[in-house]
Image (cartoon, rainbow, N blue to C red):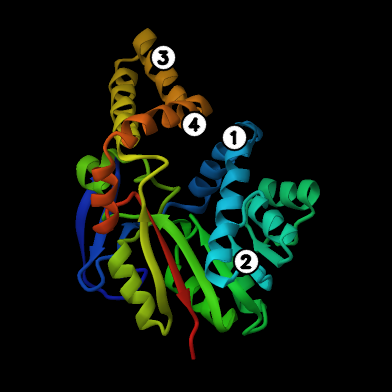
Amino acid sequence: MQCSLCGHPRLKPVFKKQSRVFYECARCEHVRVFPYPSEIETAAYYEQSYTPNYLSQNIAWFKLLAGKRVRILKDHLGEEFAGSLLDIGSGYGFFLKEAESCGWKVLGIESSPDEVDYAREQLGADVLDIDVQKALASLPGSSFDAVTFWHVLEHLERPAAAIRGSKRLLKNGGLLAINSPNLDSAVFRLLKTGWSWIHVPGHLQYFRAKPFSGWLENQGLTVQTLETWTLPPNLYFTIEEALLLRLSNILERKGGRIGRLGRTLRYFVHGSFHQHVVQMKAEALYRLTPFLERYLKTRLLGHEFLIIARNCP
């Protein structure tokens, strides 16, 4: 067992969820689960999670996210800039399609067969359906103006190798964008393992925004942007979500009709109505407390982070 980010051999257990134990590196503060789930367990999880129903419930959200992510590229590279883009973990391909419509030459890497099929057949996206490390090793060096990881790095067993492989593929001055859950967030500090993003086999790695930014600098990248996001979802919504999930767990353990009520509550929490409609309702309360957002942002306590780094010679 060693740190999956810096390779340090000294790790200590910091929290446990169900049967999983999570370890923190004594050097870089990165947290990982050990051991990793089996290939069979991981495959079953993704097959059950990323279904046609999941896509239909979230397609509007995916399209909205695609536009926001292209806007991030424009903000850092210029409104009219359109170069070569590699999106790692490209999912259903909405970001690829949006970037392509803005003039980018795009390529995705995705291991989920259903998502690859949708991206290719419905959106006409160019996607490699092989392992991330094999794909990164097979592509020519210094060939991309931008490489992106949108909520992907936390799913990988070898995040450090993926970053180094991406750096090799970036042109001089090329941009690396990483978006991931933030373990230093206020919501994790309040909820601990009750935070819905602490889950395996979905998430194997848990990054802390500021230490991770320092690690990237040590890899020869120049961090230009380090920020955390607070909405959506906002802090009020994530606390409400955690409380409902905890209640559903209690009810499910009762069994019988009460157990079925708990499962119904869980479906509601993960359903599109709760994730979108209820979440938007919580924004009204959030807007009444603007000091909270300022506090979280200035102290990098938002629930997810965005890091923009350059590959500078």
Q: Nearer the viewer, residue 24 or 94?
A: 94
Disc 3/disc 4 C-alpha distance (Å): 24 Å
The nearer-to-camera label among 3 and 4 is: 4
Query: Residue 214 or 70: which is nearer the viewer?
Result: 70
Q: Position of residue 242 (x, y in %)?
A: 31, 32
Q: Residues within 10 Å of mark 1 (few under 14, many from 20)?
A: some
Q: Which mark is nearer the camera, 4 or 2?
A: 2
Label 3 vs 2, first from the N-terminus: 2
Q: Quadrant of the N terminus?
A: bottom left
The amino acid sitting under disc 1 is Tyr
CA–CA distance in space, label 4 to label 1: 13 Å
Q: Residue 112: percent from the left, percent from the top?
A: 63, 51
Q: Residues within 10 Å of mark 2 (few under 14, many from 20)?
A: few
Q: From the viewer's perspective, is residue 26 above or below residue 53?
A: below
In depth, the one of 35 and 117 nearer the eye is 117
**Element marked by disc 2:** loop
Residue at the disc numbered 3:
260
- Quadrant assignment, res 59: top right
How far apart marks 1 and 2 lie (CA) works out to 33 Å
* Residue that numbered label 1 is attached to: 54
Which residue is most to the bottom?
313
Ranked by sequence position, the earlier of labels 3 and 4 is: 3
Callout in the foreground (1, 3): 1
Residue 61 is at least partly visible in this image: yes
